Image (cartoon, rainbow, N blue to C red):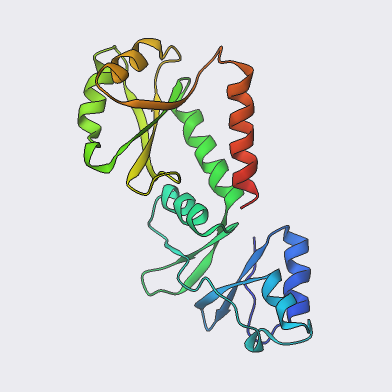
């Protein structure tokens, strides 16, 4: 639904489209080849909105995913580069379109809905200590199963990772106790009956994500 810009388009048109689609970046394409993302800052720094995009420097030419990648890769790319749109390329590296952060959140929500009711745990650990099979064994020892798992870098420590688990039970008490007994650090958990602060933290995370 978000059309790409051409090098023959003006900076003024780029800014107008950004306002229309409520985005901070838009893709620029030439002959189906993705050239990068132009931002409102790029246009303002040029000091002349009438300039064509061919005359305005822009970045993010390496920010894109392939059409066969999971939306987790889209989420990771968006967070890492602090963008609201991630271009999608095919096997020939030709431009297919963009996926927005909102699209990604919707996909994540649909997947969670399909998985049914359950709880979410976020673990922090050194990368060398990561073993999904071992963590799964500990979870299953409490008559539960991992429905999905997502690994992401820990922003506070480049030598650590965050592991987000969706588990098919809302009572995480015994699972948390087991994981902590084996040395795993739980940094967040979301379940029915959680305190209001957990809900506020989740809302804050979503707002930060939407405003990258």
Residue 55 placement (x, y as % from top left): 65, 89
Residue at image location 43% in from the left, 11% down from the top:
171
Residue 91 placement (x, y as % from top left): 36, 70
Which image quadrant for residue 195? top right
Residue 51 placement (x, y as % from top left): 74, 87
Residue at image location 59% in from the left, 38% down from the top:
205
User: 128 left or right of 19?
Assistant: left
Foreground residue among 3 and 179:
179
User: 28 left or right of 174?
Assistant: right
* Quadrant including the N terminus: bottom right
Foreground residue among 200 and 155:
155
Residue at image location 77% in from the left, 62% down from the top:
20
User: 193 left or right of 69?
Assistant: right
The vertical placement of 166 against 180, above or below, is below
The vertical placement of 200 against 156, above or below, is above
Mark count: 0
Residue 52 placement (x, y as % from top left): 70, 87
Which image quadrant for residue 57? bottom right
The vertical placement of 12 against 159, above or below, is below
Which image quadrant for residue 207? top right
Foreground residue among 2 and 59:
59
Residue at image location 32% in from the left, 47% down from the top:
159
């Amino acid at each position: 639904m978000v059309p790409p810009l051409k090098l023959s388009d003006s900076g003024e048109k780029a800014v107008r489209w950004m306002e229309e689609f409520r985005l901070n970046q838009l893709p620029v394409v030439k002959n189906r080849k993705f050239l990068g993302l132009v931002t409102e800052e790029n246009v303002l720094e040029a000091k002349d909105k009438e300039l064509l995009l061919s005359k305005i420097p822009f970045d993010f030419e390496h920010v894109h995913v392939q059409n066969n990648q999971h939306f987790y890769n889209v989420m990771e790319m968006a967070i890492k580069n602090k963008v609201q749109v991630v271009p999608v390329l095919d096997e020939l590296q030709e431009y297919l379109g963009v996926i927005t952060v909102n699209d990604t959140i919707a996909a994540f929500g649909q997947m969670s809905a399909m998985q049914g009711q359950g709880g979410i745990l976020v673990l922090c650990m050194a990368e060398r200590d990561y073993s999904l099979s071992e963590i799964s064994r500990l979870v299953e020892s409490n008559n539960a199963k991992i429905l999905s798992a997502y690994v992401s870098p820990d922003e506070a420590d480049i030598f650590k990772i965050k592991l987000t688990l969706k588990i098919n039970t809302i009572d995480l008490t015994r699972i948390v106790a087991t994981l902590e007994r084996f040395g795993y650090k739980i940094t967040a958990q979301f379940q029915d009956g959680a305190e209001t602060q957990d809900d506020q933290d989740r809302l804050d995370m979503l707002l930060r994500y939407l405003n990258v």
